[in-house]
Image: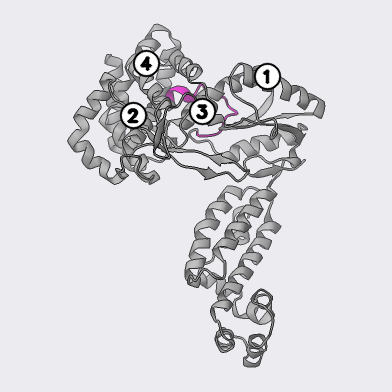
Amino acid sequence: MKRQQEIAYQLDLFTEQQQNAIHSFDNCEDVNGAEARKVKQVNKAGQQGRALTENLMTIVCSQANFKQGYLQVKRNKGVAGIDQMPTGKFADWFKEHGELFTESLLRGTYQPQAVKQVEIPKHSGGIRKPGIPTVTDRIIQQAIAQVLTPIYENEFSEFSYGFRPKRRAIQALQQAGEYVAEGRAVVVDMDLKSFFDEVNHDRLMYQLSVKIKDKILLRLIRKYLRSGILSGGLISQREKGTPQGSPLSPLLSNIVLDELDKELENREHSFVRYADDFVIFVRSRKAGERVKQSIGNFIENSLKLKVNETKSKVCYSNETTFLGHTILSDGNLIIAKDNVKRFKSKIRKITKRNRGRSFEQIVSEINSMLPGWFQYFRYTKSQKLFQNLDSWIRRKLRCYRIKQTKRVIGLQRFLYKNGVDKWQSWIIALSGKGWWRKSSSPQVHQAMNLKWFEQQGLFNLSLNYKLLNN
């Protein structure tokens, strides 16, 4: 108990000093840093380890841990749950009810509220059904995740990259590229059917109980697993699966699939996993078919999960996608064709000519999208693609802008004002061509050239790509 209080004290002290530097899950390791490593060492020591994890709720419910959890949930800007309490109101609520609230957690009498279910269409078809917990439950789950993540982090596989501190999708992609460059160009691409809806609660709770001895914490996690789902005005009980959209769900999913990672490592397979997306790299189709059958049996019989046979396949790396990328035979990455199509579809929606938005707002909406998309795909071999996309986006914007002039005289004046000769501006203004054809004319290009778009503040994909690679 003395050791437990020391960890809680250091967690409180560190958070007070560093609360302005907290960012996402990366800081779970920062909060408990050296202490997390000590937890791992003590766990391996035997009885001391079991004693250490018997009172984890003390740390979960510490004021500093709750403060960090609250700041993280507030940064995420999630919507209210079924109680309609917005994130910003939690601090006031906690001042009034915090003592009883914390006591109920430590006693094990706290009851989570039902989650509000929403439906989001998937790009690949079907519907994803994330749940929206109340702000209070999101903060509790975030607080739990902050304490458990350092305990489990060093146990996870080197080849697992999703929802882990200081690990990113690009690292998983680069590792996959290395496998292909080494000659493992055949991919066993396996899809877990509705993974978050199929997790077996009993198996998960057993996995947690092996390392975590705090029974109150274990019971609280089970309550969250079984929390009701509000859909269509009715609350139903969850019998299996982990609640998508909750702060605790990513960690729980990694704990579930760590068993798969260990099995793949024991079989000495070359693999990469990011959340529930994983691919195995082999040297021949024959080997790939054998691995697909064997690992599929392990997933369904041992993990009690389902393999989506219609989406699982054995193919060459350049015939499938992983995390939105395609891996070429030399190991280099390119943007998957489906992602380019989705990107262009979003741009089309923004630049739809009958939207009735100002040109400045259209540019602003595009700029809110481009940097993030570029950052995700910036390590691909896509210089020519970025140039083509830049050119296409500018043409969409030119078309949108000249249509705003509405009349012949309006277009002529706009072109003339932006440097086009008077007689040349009249030629295009009086043309019977449609707006899209006019947008590619030399006069329109002259009026809205690269410098003009730079003045409008439009994000330039190819320019940023060149700066990154110089």
Residue 450 visible in the shown view: no
Report how far apart the C-alphas of labels 1 and 2 lie in the structure. 36 Å
Residue 196 visible in the shown view: yes
Q: From the image, state whether disc 4 or disc 3 is nearer to you.
A: 3
Q: Which amino acid does label 2 sit on?
A: Pro
Sooner in the amino-acid sequence: mark 3 or mark 2: 2
Are the residues tagged 4 and 3 within 8 Å (C-beta)? no
Sooner in the amino-acid sequence: mark 3 or mark 1: 3
Sooner in the amino-acid sequence: mark 1 or mark 4: 4
Are the residues tagged 3 and 2 within 8 Å (C-beta)? no
Mark 4 Cα shell of 10 Å, populated few (<14), some (14-19), many (≥20): many
Residue assigned mark 2: 112
Q: What residue type is labelled 1?
A: Asn
User: Residue at the spot x=27%, y=36% of the render?
Assistant: 16
Image location of residue 34, percent across then percent down: 39, 25
Q: From the image, state whether disc 1 or disc 4 is nearer to you.
A: 1
Q: Residue 253 got which mark?
A: 3
Sooner in the amino-acid sequence: mark 1 or mark 2: 2
Q: Write the start and end of the magenta stretch as one range.
A: 150-163
Are the residues tagged 1 and 4 within 8 Å (C-beta)? no
Residue sitting farthest toward the left? 96
